[in-house]
Amino acid sequence: MRLYAKQHGIDLATVRGTGRDGLITRADVEALLGSAPAAAPSRPPVTGPTTTTRFVGHDLAPWSSGPEVERIPVRGVLRSMAEAMTQSAFSAPHAAVWVRLDATRTMELLAALKERPAFAGVRLSPLAIVAMAVCDAARHFPGVNSSFDAEKGEVVVRRVVNLGIAADTPRGLIVPNVKGADRLDLVGVARALNALVDTARAGTTAPNDMLGTTITITNVGPFNVDAAVPILPPGTGAIVAVGRVAPAPWVVDGEVVVRQVTELAMSFDHRQVDGALASRVLRHIADYLEDPAARLIAG
């Protein structure tokens, strides 16, 4: 029974036994599995040679009917993104580390928290837990929350996290931030992320909301991909990419079971953040996601 529960990602401590003397039976585990809400399938947008797509903030004509060669003016959000990424790529020497981890407990915690009154009306996703983990890593390793000031010959370490969130919007990629994210609890972070994403998608993000980012998260999971190695936003020392969470074989106590697995990657500015620090930071984030309840309680 223990193996069967592990294979389906069930913690037996959460199962109420109906057998003799409270013994947990297979039927108890199957009943819990049957009561769990089925995840809505991720449905990519319908695309094809006769459909319109979004590209650099524009509706791009279909392959079948658009011009053979099309020129799009570089202005607005596209100009800002192009200038920022070019500046970053050619001024900060990029390096990266990545890790694969068991996020089963994160997914279980999210499912449990969604039933609590404190989270009523709050869209709670793995991104909120990742945000908490990144802020916790910055508190433990402040050097990762830094920037390199080449003009003044200084490394600037900040002990407040203005957490940038890369947002895919109809106008293109923007990176607004949650000011003082390290000072928020999980409810506060979740609400702030909801507001940030809603504002970005509505195209009403204020310029001030994109200033002062200290560290960034980009979430490629909704696109159903495993990982990415992102470019740093200018003026920051690190950016964490989060891949999709999906069932995969995992070894637990010497046995192969099915767990909810994800991958993290972190690009960093190698002028001030070395590989040892980057590895410790990413491992800290991974450990947090593998046992988030304990980390949240510990603060």
Image (tube, rainbow, N blue to C red):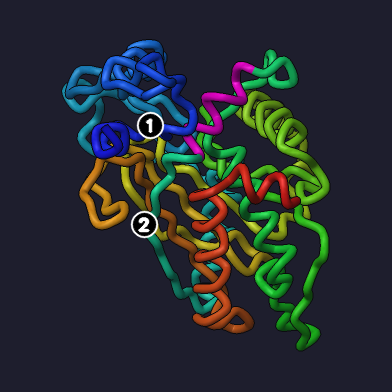
Label 1 Cα crowd, 10 Å radius (few <14 / some 14-19 / many 20+): many
Residue at the spot 61% in from the left edge and 16% down from the top edge: 115
The quarter of the picture where residue 67 lies is top left
Residue 10 badge: 1
Residue 68 image point, x, y percent: 20, 35
Report helix, strand or loop for mark 1: loop
Nearer to the camera, 211 or 64 = 211
Nearer to the camera, 184 or 71 = 184
Q: Amino acid at mark 1?
A: Ile
Which residue position is annotated with label 2? 100
Residue 224 belongs to magenta span? no
Compared across the picture, whether 30 is left or right of 101 comes to left
| Magenta highlight: main SS | helix
Please indicate, yes or no, whether residue 40 appears anywhere in the rendered image: no
Quadrant, the N terminus: top left
Magenta segment = 106-115
Q: Amino acid at mark 2?
A: Arg
Is 5 above or below relative to 114?
Answer: below
The quarter of the picture where residue 148 lies is bottom right
Residue 227 image point, x, y percent: 36, 52
Nearer to the camera, 71 or 181 = 181
Residue 92 badge: none
Report helix, strand or loop for mark 2: strand
Mark closer to the chain start, 1 or 2: 1
Residue 203 image point, x, y percent: 64, 26
